[in-house]
Amino acid sequence: MPDAGCRMPDAGRVAEPTFGLSPEWLLADGKPFVDGLVLSHPEQLERLRRVCPEAEAASVLAGDPCFDRMLAARPHRERFRRALGVRRGQRLVVLNSTWNPEGFFGNGGDQDVLPSLLPRLTADLPADDYRLAAVLHPNIWYGHGPGQIRAWLDRARRGGLTLIDPVHAWRQALLAADAVVGDFGAVSYYSAALGTPVLLASAAQDRLDPEAPLAAFVRHAPRLDPHGPLRDQVEELLTRHRPAADPAEFVSSAPGASAALLRRHFYALMELPEPEAPALLEPLPLPPYTPARRTAPLNVRTRVRGAEVRIERTTGHPYDAVGETTHLAVHEDTRDPGDLTHADVIVREGRPDDPRLGGPEEWTAEVLRRYPHCALAAYVTGPDRCTVRTRDGEVLHLSAGPGADAAPAAYASALYAWRAGGGTVPPGGTTLRVRAAGGVHPVTVAPA
């Protein structure tokens, strides 16, 4: 497996022991203490013979069941993307960190990249073009605690970042990803083996066995410049990517066969006959629906040409932002209530019959009474629709037309920009063409 190329700290040795493939990990009183040492590729067996020949007799080549589960689940990629709320035209960027002081999410020192990088990513990457998720090693969650992790990443989470379950959902996130930004851990290597573009933000060579395939991958993978334009680097990665053969070759010598190989070995150890039924792995489950939730204020830039509205929304002010007019869209659950007093558009999600909010018409009326500066209140009732009220009292239903798949809050901001440019909704309604995420989304606007 990919982790077999990592070294563990040992201040008393000139060469650090390789995790899983050295006497320190495999021998007790000079003899193997395991009945079976599972290896995924003959390359690992060759290294084992060199560094710990005493353990060779206990080794068994059995492929990689983790990778096999991902290969089997590949046909469900679009389902996994929908589970994360990835919309048509959006690119899912998955960030990952292994458990290591020099990892992407390190020890808080000068080289610790991830905590400061994540808010920049959510601020610089347009909300309708990109979806962000993070996979942190389980030991990071255990070592610091879930509350501390969420507190450290609070700003990025309010900007739309989703934290992925590090045990049950990380494989599905990798299958759904368009690009991965990570470090020298197994998740980055698995991503490369799946053919996904990988950008390394942390690549400490001294933590790797120089003879391991993982080390070769780290030496040649493209690097992230944390101080350079992030959007340009991600887009260049996606444009220039050509899948490498080595990760897919070395992650497993028996793709799809690990279940049969492992069961054969287990029953041999127990001196029992194998069952006649085929050996099968548990399929990867479909994760719960977890769309992006942005409660940080969004700077919205638009360009209106007739009924077509080009829109770009970010939590920051990127240097390469495009648009002719701007406005501020704020979620009602923003951290700073003062943001609402300056908002041009105020948004929230809710069921149409939610008694706490009074439904779309009551909530929108209340918001406009409370915030005199606000010109449009939008109540999102589903992944493809919302109800809005304008300052002059119009109540309108916005719904996605054929082929449309952008966020309803983006539809509301597009309507605001169109009306600010002189657009009016006729009694029979109209259709706006919202340009976002590299496509055009027809949106039906109808009086309530």
Image (cartoon, rainbow, N blue to C red):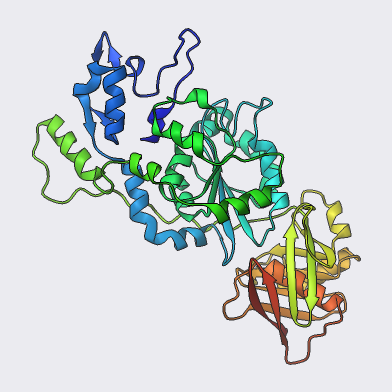
As drawn, is 209 to the left or to the right of 226? left
Is 74 located above or below residue 271 in the figure? below
Q: Tell me which residue sits at (83%, 75%) in the image.
A: 390
Is 78 located above or below residue 114 in the figure? below
Residue 172 image point, x, y percent: 45, 51
As drawn, is 279 to the left or to the right of 167? left
- As rendered, which of 401 and 428 lies closer to the eye? 401
Q: Tell me which residue sits at (62%, 54%) in the image.
A: 235
Residue 46 in sight from this viewpoint: yes
Tell me the quarter of the image containing the N terminus: top left
Is 220 located above or below residue 398 in the figure? above
Tell me the quarter of the image containing the C terminus: bottom right
Q: Tell me which residue sits at (78%, 82%) in the image.
A: 306
- As rendered, which of 447 and 329 lies closer to the eye? 329
Residue 35 in sight from this viewpoint: no
Residue 147 image point, x, y percent: 62, 36
